[in-house]
């Protein structure tokens, strides 16, 4: 399996991802699935800078859905990131991510968001999306860094 | 509309950048610190209009997080964008896009490479026989040449480039610098291990058993990575505690 | 009364960790030397700081993740060990430091939660920005108070424990240092792991290793 991590992280490529996870998983490339970012050159320039020598692929959600199989079979190791939970839900529709694990990283505080963990703030819609992802046969859990404690979806939805 | 920023305002912003993490919090992270650092510039640009000023402070209170030294790139660039009268929504999008890359570039260059490289070199000096104060002084001086240099350089670059910092930063190749520093760090780590083994008061003087145990510990760390750090530290504390209690019991 | 002075030192160095400057005078090596110098035990301060520095080499403050607080931990370790003699002061001081590093780390997390309530957010009416200044400065002062209290409590607890345990410490100096260096060796291994492991970097590592071993023979 060549997609070594599926993660939701508002900041996409940043220190926790590139050093925290990158230095454990040694990815060859990051796949950023985000509809807006896929069409913005100057923003892509910025995100490419932070990848620490690994490649960066930008993709819309639709195109990502059709390329997941190809990425899985590729020789390169990829970390796939989305900015929000809803994008990951759309990616997971029709069992495309069935059998995978989705990791929840940082989503910060904002209007309508409750603190669930230090690094994770969810809206009511987020909670529904998480249930929908789990219903597609995906194991969802939160963990900011590889050596921190993994929190299961059940615990997240209780809090 | 583009307006000049007096030297005084630029200098005040740079000085405040050293406090950008002063109110680090889980809601906006560096958001409040970013607004704090922007205040001299915002007062200069919008101070005469309370409504504009309120809106400007509010948009810089939003979530921000990056490496503290490289935050200066965003700070300089945003100061430039505000002075140029850029659209607030464009400024917001710029801050959102720039925070992650500045975080990962800075973490890789500073926290994961520059800091350990200078610290490991200083520790090697110590185990090679330099007094503690000399090793500490070496660390503080060398480390901060890089630190303050990086803050000043990134602030100036941001101020000059505005939204195009991505392109300019790409040419500087900070990732390449990180990659070039890594072998130096590995070599220094070898130096530290060698000197802590053979140095005065080092492991060889403690005895063969300790050399063997330390070698085993090193291998566990090398293969296990970060997840073994906490158990190893806990085990060390437990071992010291057990030895102490054994002494008391005797 | 040196507990007050030591507490203030821990508070000041703790500030450097996050809130003010990040000149890295909060690193254990520097904090150990400063605490040792303040308490008249410079050699002990350097040694304990040097050992804790090795432990915390791999614990850098990435993206606000929780990490042991090196500054207060080191000041606590040195100040707890300073009044006592014997081979046990170094390992027992280091142990107290490692434990207090976790408590310091937890207090940093608590302070960051407190800051969340303290700082104005974009929805709040900001007026001329004075509220930002008040909250920001208050957070920095609170962080100093936090670091001072963490340090003072650690020194008191550490000194009580060490006054008892150092008297009965059963090992001589060699094994006592060996004991703490084994844990440090794990950290050094983790750092090499982070840099790509031995296989990727063996030339540089072995060259450094050889230089280190040879170097100790000449210096």
Image: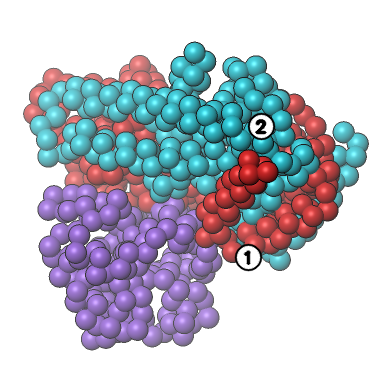
Q: Is residue C44 left or right of residue B24?
A: right
What hue represents chain B?
red
The percent coordinates of residue C154 (x first, y second) are: 47, 31
The colouring scheme, among rainbow, by chain, secondary structure or one colour, is: by chain
Q: In the drawing, what numbered circle is on residue C167?
A: 2
- Front-lying residue, B236 or A61: B236
- Front-lying residue, C135 or B201: B201
Residue C166 picture quarter: top right
Task: Using the image, name the chain to which the residue with label 1 belongs.
Answer: B
State how far apart marks 2 and 1 are (Cα).
Answer: 38 Å
Residue at the farthest front position: B250
Q: In the drawing, what numbered circle is on residue B223?
A: 1
The percent coordinates of residue C81 (x first, y second) are: 61, 28
Task: Using the image, name the chain to which the residue with label 2 belongs.
Answer: C
Query: In which quadrant is the C terminus of chain C drawn?
Result: top right
Task: Tell me the residue at 56%/59% (across/down).
Answer: B228
The percent coordinates of residue B120 (x first, y second) are: 67, 42
Q: Is residue B8 left or right of residue B32?
A: right
Task: Tell me the residue at 61%/35% (across/down).
Answer: C165
Relative to A118, say whether B134 is above or below: above
- Front-lying residue, B250 or C131: B250
Q: Which chain is cyan?
A: C
Question: Can the viewer see residue A39?
Answer: no
At mark 2, the secondary structure is: helix
Task: Tell me the residue at 39%/60% (across/down).
Answer: A149
What hue represents chain A?
purple
Q: Are marks 2 and 1 on the same chain?
A: no
């Amino acid at each position: 399996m060549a997609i070594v991590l599926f993660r939701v992280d508002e900041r996409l490529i940043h220190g926790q991802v590139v050093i925290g996870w990158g230095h454990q998983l040694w990815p060859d490339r990051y796949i950023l699935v985000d509809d807006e970012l896929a069409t913005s050159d100057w923003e892509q320039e910025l995100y490419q800078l932070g990848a620490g020598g690994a490649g960066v692929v930008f993709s819309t959600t639709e195109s990502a859905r059709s390329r997941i199989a190809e990425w899985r079979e590729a020789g390169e190791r990829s970390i796939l990131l989305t900015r929000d939970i809803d994008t990951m839900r759309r990616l997971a529709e029709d069992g495309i991510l069935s059998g995978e694990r989705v990791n929840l990283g940082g989503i910060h505080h904002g209007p309508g968001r409750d603190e669930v963990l230090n690094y994770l703030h969810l809206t009511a819609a987020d909670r529904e999306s998480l249930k929908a992802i789990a219903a597609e046969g995906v194991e969802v859990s939160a963990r900011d860094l590889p050596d921190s404690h993994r929190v299961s979806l059940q615990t997240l939805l209780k809090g | 509309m583009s307006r000049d920023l007096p030297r005084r305002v630029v200098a005040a912003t740079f000085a405040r950048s050293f406090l950008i993490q002063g109110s680090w919090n889980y809601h906006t992270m560096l958001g409040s610190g970013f607004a704090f650092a922007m205040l001299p510039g915002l007062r200069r640009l919008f101070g005469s209009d309370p409504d504009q000023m309120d809106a400007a402070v509010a948009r810089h209170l939003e979530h921000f997080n990056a490496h503290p030294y490289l935050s200066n790139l965003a700070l300089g660039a945003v100061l430039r964008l505000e002075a140029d009268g850029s659209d607030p929504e464009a400024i917001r999008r710029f801050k959102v896009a720039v925070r992650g890359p500045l975080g990962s570039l800075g973490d890789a260059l500073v926290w994961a490479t520059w800091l350990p490289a200078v610290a490991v070199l200083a520790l090697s000096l110590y185990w090679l026989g330099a007094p503690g104060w000399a090793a500490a002084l070496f660390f503080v001086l060398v480390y901060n040449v890089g630190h303050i240099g990086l803050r000043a350089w990134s602030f100036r670059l941001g101020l000059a480039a505005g939204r195009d910092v991505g392109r300019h930063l790409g040419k500087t190749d900070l990732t390449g610098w990180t990659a070039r520093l890594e072998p130096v760090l590995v070599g220094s780590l070898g130096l530290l291990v060698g000197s802590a083994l053979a140095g005065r008061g080092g492991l060889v003087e403690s005895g063969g058993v300790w050399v063997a145990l330390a070698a085993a510990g090193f291998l566990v760390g090398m293969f296990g990575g970060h997840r073994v750090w906490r158990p190893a530290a806990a085990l060390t504390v437990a071992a010291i505690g057990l030895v102490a209690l054994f002494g008391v019991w005797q | 009364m040196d507990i007050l002075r030591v507490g203030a030192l821990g508070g000041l160095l703790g500030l450097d960790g996050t809130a003010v400057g990040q000149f890295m005078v909060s690193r254990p090596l520097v904090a150990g030397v400063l605490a040792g110098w303040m308490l008249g035990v410079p050699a002990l301060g350097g040694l304990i700081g040097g050992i804790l520095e090795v432990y915390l080499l791999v614990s850098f403050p990435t993206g606000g993740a929780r990490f042991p607080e090196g500054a207060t931990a080191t000041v606590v370790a040195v100040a707890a060990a300073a009044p006592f003699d014997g081979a046990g002061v170094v390992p027992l001081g280091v142990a107290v430091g490692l434990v207090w590093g976790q408590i310091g780390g937890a207090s940093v997390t608590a302070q960051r939660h407190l800051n969340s309530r303290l700082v104005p957010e974009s929805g709040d009416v900001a007026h001329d920005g004075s509220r930002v200044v008040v909250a920001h400065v208050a957070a920095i002062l609170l962080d100093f108070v936090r670091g001072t209290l963490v340090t003072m409590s650690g020194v008191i607890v550490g000194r009580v424990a060490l006054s008892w345990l150092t008297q009965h410490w059963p090992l001589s100096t060699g094994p006592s240092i060996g004991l703490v260096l084994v844990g440090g060796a794990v950290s050094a291994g983790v750092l090499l792991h982070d840099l790509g492991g031995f296989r990727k970097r063996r030339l540089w590592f072995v060259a450094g290793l050889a230089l280190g071993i040879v170097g100790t023979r000449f210096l």
